Amino acid sequence: MKKLRYVTIGIIAITLFTGSSRVPVSIGEGDHDKDSMRVVMRFELKVKPESVALLKQSFDACKVEVLAKEPGCLDYTLFQSYNDSTLFCINETWATKGDHDRHMQLEHTKKHLAETKGIRDPSFKSTTSYMYWICPEVNNVK
């Protein structure tokens, strides 16, 4: 069961990052291109104890830039576990896949990724990270 979960997450990640997501999705009245759907992501990560402050500082600096310069970002939030100060959850919601793709190319994102490279606890394997594609029109059914 655990392997199936990892395979599913891997397939979703490959689909998102290889550009092979141009698959029409039917919601009843018409087809919708996945690239025009919202992208909702949740990443769970555990960092080395000495890296907790670095992650929080780097994420907060990046978030300021994201909120100021990226109108396609609908949510960009870092949560820290109450029970384990080294365990974090990052939630991101993007209006479209293109908005997320642009985010990954911007200097503040690259800086954050460079600053936080190597801070993860290598023994931790998330079981709750996910990515969803959401068609906003689905909620507008009359």
Image (cartoon, rainbow, N blue to C red):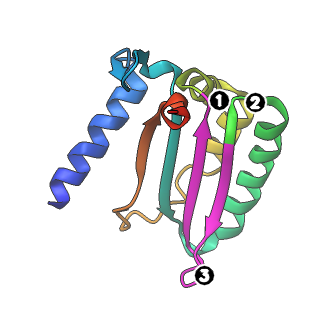
Q: Specify the quadrant of the image occupied by residue 102.
A: top right
Residue position for label 2: 70
Residue position for label 1: 103
Asked if labels 1 and 2 touch by Cβ distance under 8 angstroms, the answer is yes
Measured as percent of width and height from the top left, residue 90 is found at 58, 55
Q: Label 3 is placed on what type of residue?
A: Tyr
Q: Is residue 53 left or right of residue 104?
A: right
In the foreground, 81 or 107: 81
Residue depicted at 75% across the width and 30% down the height: 70
Q: Looking at the picture, does residue 128 appear above or below residue 10?
A: below
In the foreground, 134 or 12: 134
Measured as percent of width and height from the top left, residue 57 is found at 76, 59
Extreme residue in the front direction: 142
Extreme residue in the bottom direction: 83
Local crowd size for mark 3, using a 10 Å CA cut-off: few (<14), some (14–19), many (≥20): few
Measured as percent of width and height from the top left, residue 133 is found at 44, 35
Question: Does the magenta-highlighted stretch encompass residue 76?
Answer: yes
Spatial separation of the CA atoms under disc 2 and disc 3: 30 Å
Q: Label 2 is placed on what type of residue?
A: Glu
The region drawn magenta spans 75-95
Q: Which quadrant of the figure contains the N terminus?
A: bottom left
Residue depicted at 69% across the width and 29% down the height: 72
Q: Looking at the picture, does residue 36 appear above or below residue 49?
A: above
Question: Along the polypeptide, which appears first: circle 2 or circle 3?
Answer: 2
Residue position for label 3: 82
Q: Label 1 is placed on what type of residue?
A: His
In the foreground, 58 or 39: 39
